[in-house]
């Protein structure tokens, strides 16, 4: 039986059982298409990163004897449409059976289901053999629970997979060391090791993209592309994280600094989300390293990392499949404003936003607090349409694939789902940013000022937002303290906050 097997750009798992043996009757198919570069506007490093990793994956498996048909973005045979490419190949190669691995995006899942309905040959879908959980596991887990709180799921996963457990109790005596992961980093504290960069020359890929007139944004050094694009390189990043960064990861997990863009973050998300490495081997390596270096590494460092990968990552994927397709249109707070120009240009007088946006434009990367408490916070306080926020986040970050992006953005960041993912909106005035970073020290606005033209715009926007959305939060117990403070505020003071906020929202490019 002659089989055609599709591999998507985020399915670069060399350890998949498909590749255990070479079969002369199996043809693997991969393609770089305008259908995928065009469903949203992407950062150039994201497009290049995927293409480079896909080509490397194909070459390595081809060297082992597997048959590949690979369409580059410039290939003449490329129809730039998933369904049309596959239909054509089935006909040309007299294929008897079409096989694919379950996509992680609802959009692509629908494409493939439609394709399977259109073709008359045998077809079969397989698991990607990547995640700890299946698509439907989280739905099943929460069937008997009133709330879909991540903590319940995380603890169950720790027990089920015996990770950081002492018999049936959490190692270290508690499940969560989040309160230990909120330290501010300064240059006087622990030195940050030089980052592990790979400096690939991707000029040829960039030229192909430009020749095909692909629309993109962001910046790139084509001769020094820094991201891992193979399994071997991804494992080097994992080793580097364990050897050099894990010791202080948890401490400064939420910290931000103008001179240290990455701090002690692993930068493994691109490797994980393309499946070049698995969450299981990642966690096993990190936990093993911790157990071998307990005298040097506190459990709060490793638990913070495990919570992100085993808890949050698997939880977000489960919630995605639990909530789609309706989740994509949720806008509980009824926000309709346009995304501000500064998100595309980085031009703003607000130093925290300038740092976070320009870092994103330069590196296709920002860590979770920059994404949540600066970029997401400002968009929410400006009451931006979550559709526009989703599109920007999905395009700008090299690790952004819809299953993990939309749940974090529309759910946790923008509270557009009304509390399905997060029990309250993640908003703050300038105080939080000042607490966790040095951004405010060199900003022309004064974070300590609550009133006036030179007061931090976050301070005005925060109270205006609470006032504007009061009806949405009146029954939310977690918002009681903030709403009480709002109600106790002097009328004239609130009026001033709202007046200044309206000026900012109306003309954000002036700030």
Image (cartoon, rainbow, N blue to C red):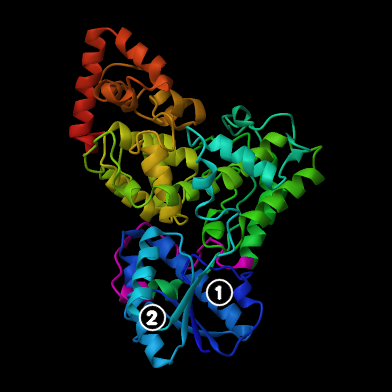
Q: Position of residue 262 (x, y in %)?
A: 54, 45
Mark 2 or mark 1: name the one nearer the start of the chain: 1
Q: Is residue 59 magenta?
A: no
- Distance of mark 2 from mark 1, alpha carbons? 20 Å
Looking at the image, residue 466 sits to the left or right of residue 135; the answer is left
x then y, percent, for residue 152: 57, 36
Drawn side of residue 225 relative to residue 14, left or right: left
Coordinates of residue 210 in the picture (x, y in percent): 33, 72
Magenta residues span 208-231
Q: Secondary structure at mark 1?
A: helix
Type of secondary structure dominating the magenta stretch: loop
How many neighbours does mark 2 have within 10 angstroms: few (below 14), some (14-19), or many (20 or more)?
many
Q: Visible in this render: residue 34?
A: yes
Q: Which residue is mark 2?
A: 86
Image point (44%, 38%), residue name = 421
Left or right: 37, with 21 as reference point? left
Element at label 2: helix
Name the residue nearer the viewer: 137 or 294. Answer: 137
In the rendered image, residue 51, in percent from the top left (x then y), is placed at: 45, 70
Task: Give the residue at mark 1.
Answer: 57
Q: Is residue 222 visible?
A: no
Quarter-wise, where is residue 213 in the image?
Answer: bottom left
Q: Which picture quadrant has residue 419?
A: top left
């Amino acid at each position: 039986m002659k089989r055609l097997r599709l591999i998507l750009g985020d399915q670069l798992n060399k350890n998949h059982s498909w590749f255990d043996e070479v079969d002369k009757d199996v043809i693997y198919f991969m393609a770089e298409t305008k259908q995928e570069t065009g469903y949203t506007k992407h950062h150039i490093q994201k497009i290049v990163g995927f293409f480079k990793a896909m080509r490397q994956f194909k070459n390595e498996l081809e060297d082992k004897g597997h048959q590949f048909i690979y369409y580059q973005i410039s290939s003449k045979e490329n129809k730039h449409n998933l369904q049309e490419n596959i239909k054509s190949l089935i006909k040309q190669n007299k294929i008897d059976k079409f096989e694919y691995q379950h996509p992680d995006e609802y959009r692509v899942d629908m494409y493939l289901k439609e394709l399977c309905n259109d073709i008359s040959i045998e077809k079969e879908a397989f698991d990607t053999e990547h995640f700890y959980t299946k698509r439907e596991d989280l739905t099943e887990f929460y069937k008997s629970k009133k709330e879909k709180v991540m903590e319940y799921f995380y603890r169950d996963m720790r027990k089920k997979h015996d990770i950081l457990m002492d018999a049936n109790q959490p190692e270290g005596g508690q499940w969560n060391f989040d309160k230990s992961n909120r330290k501010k980093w300064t240059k006087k504290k622990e030195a940050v090791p030089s980052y592990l960069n790979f400096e690939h020359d991707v000029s040829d890929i960039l030229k192909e993209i430009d020749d095909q007139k692909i629309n993109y944004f962001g910046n790139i050094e084509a001769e020094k592309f820094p991201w891992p694009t193979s399994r071997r390189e991804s494992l080097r990043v994992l080793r580097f994280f364990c050897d050099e960064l894990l010791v202080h990861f948890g401490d400064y997990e939420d910290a931000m600094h103008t001179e240290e863009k990455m701090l002690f973050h692993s930068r493994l998300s691109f490797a994980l989300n393309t499946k070049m490495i698995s969450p299981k081997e990642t966690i096993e390596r990190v936990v093993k390293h911790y157990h071998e270096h307990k005298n040097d590494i506190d459990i709060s460092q490793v638990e913070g990392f495990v919570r992100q990968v085993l808890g949050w990552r698997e939880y977000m994927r489960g919630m995605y499949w639990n909530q789609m397709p309706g989740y994509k249109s949720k806008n509980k707070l009824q926000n309709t404003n346009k995304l501000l120009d500064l998100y595309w240009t980085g031009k703003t007088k607000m130093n925290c936003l300038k740092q976070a946006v320009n870092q994103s434009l330069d590196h296709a990367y920002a860590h979770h607090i920059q994404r949540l408490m600066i970029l997401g916070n400002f968009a929410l306080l400006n009451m931006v349409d979550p559709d526009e926020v989703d599109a920007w986040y999905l395009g700008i970050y090299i690790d952004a694939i819809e299953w993990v992006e939309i749940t974090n953005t529309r759910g946790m960041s923008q509270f557009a789902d009304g509390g399905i993912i997060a029990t309250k909106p993640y908003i703050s005035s300038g105080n939080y940013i000042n607490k966790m970073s040095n951004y405010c020290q060199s900003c022309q606005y004064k974070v300590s000022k609550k009133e006036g033209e030179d007061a931090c715009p976050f301070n005005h926007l925060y109270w205006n937002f609470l006032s504007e959305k009061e009806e949405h939060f009146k029954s939310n117990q977690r918002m009681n303290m903030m709403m009480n403070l709002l109600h106790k505020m002097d009328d004239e003071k609130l009026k001033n906050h709202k007046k200044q906020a309206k000026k900012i929202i109306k003309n954000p490019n002036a700030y």
